[in-house]
Structures are given as C-alpha cells and as structure tokens.
Amino acid sequence: MAIKDDIDCYSHPSKGATAWMHEVREVKKDAVSVSRLRSCGAILVGKANMHELGLGTTGNNANYGTTRNPHDPDRYTGGSSSGPAAIVASGLCSAALGTDGGGSVRIPSSLCGVVGLKSTYGRTDMTGSLCDDGTVAIIGPIATTVEDTILVYAAILGSSPADRISLRPSLPCVPNFSSQESLQSVESLRLGKYTEWFNDVFSTDISDKCGNVLSRLSEKHGCETVEIVIPELHEMRLAHVVSIGSEALCALNPDCYDGKGERLTYDTRTNLALFRSFTAADYVAAQRLRRRLMYFHMEIFKRVDIIVTPTTGMTAPIIPPGALKVGETNLQVTGNLMRFIITANLLGLPAVTVPVGYDKQGLPIGIQLIGRPWCEASILRLAAAIEETCAEPKKKPLQYYDILKGN
C-alpha cells in the first residue's frame, strides 16, 4: 500500500507536497490509520504525491511533478489524492490511503477508474494527518475493487476518543457478501435521483452511463429510482468553500506569517488569498447553512436510502503544457470536478465512487453513492452489486504494471 503525503507514515516526512512542511513538522510516529494497517500486516511502500496541501482538484504539483493519469498520460489524475489513485490504477499497489475534504479521494478515483470511499465524518481517526483539525476531511481507502476497499476500510475504521464522545457513532459494520440476506437487501433499496442535477455534466457520456446503471439496478435487482429535489445547491457550495477554506487557513496561518507562504505554489497562494477574504461572520453563516442543509437531506433520506449521482461532471482534463512548470488555477475545471462532491464533505455523509464505464475517448467514468450518516455498509453493498452486474468490463490503462506477473 501507498500512503498520501499528508498522512504520517514513520519514518517518512509528511510534506503535504510542499517544499517546506517537513522543516516545521516532525513525524514521530504513524498516523492512527497507518498504525492499524501495519498491525494487519500491510506492506507500506512509501508516500504518494498529491496536490499541494490538498488545495486543488487536478493533482497538479509544480514542486515534485504532476502525477499523470495511467489511462492517458497527457491528462490529470484528479486530486488532491493524485498519487494514491494513479498508483492503484496502474497496478503498482492494490490499495492506498488518501484524504477527502472536498472530493480528494473520490475525484481521482473516478478519473483513474478505481474505487474510492469517503466514510462518515468521525468514523475513522484523523490523528496524524495534516488535516486532522477540520470538520470536512476524512482518511479513506482507494482500491481496485469494492472488496479491497472494504478490507482497507475495515482495517482503519474506529473513531477517535473525542469523536466517540461528541458524535456518538453507531457500531460499524461491513457487508457480508456470502450472506443471502445481504444480497437480498439490495433489492429493497430506494435510490434518489435529482434529474436536473444528475444531467448537469460536461459530457452526456457521463449522465448516460450513470443512467444506464440505474436502469440495470432496476432490471436486475428491483431497485426503485425515486425522483428527488435537493434545494440550495449553490448555497451548499459556498458553505463548503467557506468552511474548508477558513479551516485550512487557520491551520496554515502561523507558517504563512513565518514566511513559508512565499514558498507555496502560485495555485495554493491564489486559494489562500481567496480564503483570507472570508470573515468570522461568513464562517458562522456557513455553519448555519450546514445545519439547514442537513435537515433537507435527512428529510430526503426518509424517502430514499441512497442518493445517486455521477462522481464528477467531466472526465480527466488535459494537462496544459505550461501548467507543469508553474501550476494553474482553472475554476471552470474545478467546478466540473466538484459538482457532485461537496454534499458528503459539508454534511459528513458517507459516499463511494465506483467505475461504471468509459467515455468516447476511453476515459473512466464513476458513479457516486451517498448514504445516511454511519451507513457505509449500505453504499458498499450497492457498490458491489454495481461492480458485479451493472458496470462495463474494465480496460487496462495504457500505463499498467502487473505486480504478480512482473510486467
């Protein structure tokens, strides 16, 4: 397994893909999630590249080089967990750990054609990561199959003592695929689809492929698709960027005041400049919106079990040649990649992306399943059904290494 560069894996430094983080923050032990993996016998091959400080969705990194998409090296992997997704998709590791505060596990997983899980906020212990003091991020697995994703999730799950007191999570459980009852439970699922949102994609290849999956789930498993309306999506995006931006800036301010901010990439500095425009009143308003939006979603979950969307609004974008040296800020691409992502982060809901096919250019497409709080088992069970009976056959990426055959 590989570990994203913002998660502590002793004795490697955690740089967060910056040029200086290791100078001000010493890694003295494994992150809790990494320690749990070691205790299960995981072989950790090292740290994986990422978008600097996780503040981007493409995976561009002018400090250490931009990770390339194994399906097309001229395209981005997505981010910020770019390295973990590319490593898994190219066959170098069967699984990896990433972090997800704004789709950073699910976006690259979708663009690279692998499975990525964002668990309920507080389900896994964030201690030992660079983003362990916010309210939107989690540590989650990226793997080639749903079953491998479940194995890694089962190894790392377990809330921190503080989260057990404040969030009172329900007992974790994982699907038992050998159980007939587990298979039958897929048949009774009600799947929520907000058609106007579902179809708001850069290419109709994405909505068509994901729509076909819903049709097959109905035909093969008897799942019911229920039309829903999710209000205030624009307000949700604003509340998310104010929340994650303010929390990231709060963590970075001491180092920025100490002069380290000038050593960040232009892309990161642009984002931090935006975050500095937010006020305390903006942050409080975002949390009020958060509570209101949670109410709307819990009302929707009285009618459906899982909300289904495409994972991203576009497939892997092309890397502009000039961006390799100095980075880039492209808010249109960011908007397309994050269109369906932020609900799970702002509201702390579990979500998983599963590859379901390819667009006309042969680039992977993912479908996203969003569940009720603490209901990871439900979305993973449906994800396994999609992988087994509804998705198109997988294609090997252009860049692939079979570690079992050695080629």
Image: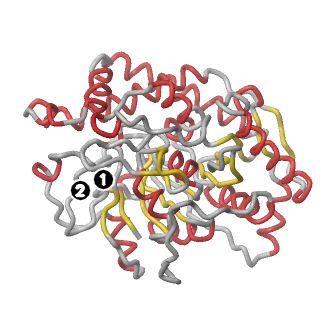
Tell me which label, 1 or 2, sits earlier in the chain. 1
Which residue is most to the front? 321
Residue at 37% across, 23% down: 283
Circle 2: is it few (<14), some (14-19), or many (20+) Cα within 10 Å? many
- Closest to the observer, 122 or 177: 177
Q: Position of residue 70 (x, y in %)?
A: 50, 57
Residue at 52% across, 67% down: 400
Query: Where does the N terminus fall, quadrant-wise?
Result: bottom left
**How many numbered circles does the render carry?**
2
Q: Position of residue 41 (x, y in %)?
A: 40, 82
Q: Are marks 1 and 2 in contact (CB under 8 Å)?
A: yes
- Closest to the observer, 30 or 77: 77
Residue named by callout 1: 6
Q: Position of residue 314 (x, y in %)?
A: 60, 36
Residue named by callout 2: 14
Residue at 17% across, 48% down: 21
Give the amino acid type for the residue marked by disc 2 in the picture: Ser
Q: Secondary structure at mark 1?
A: loop
Q: With 153 as the anchor, is 63 left or right in this view?
A: left
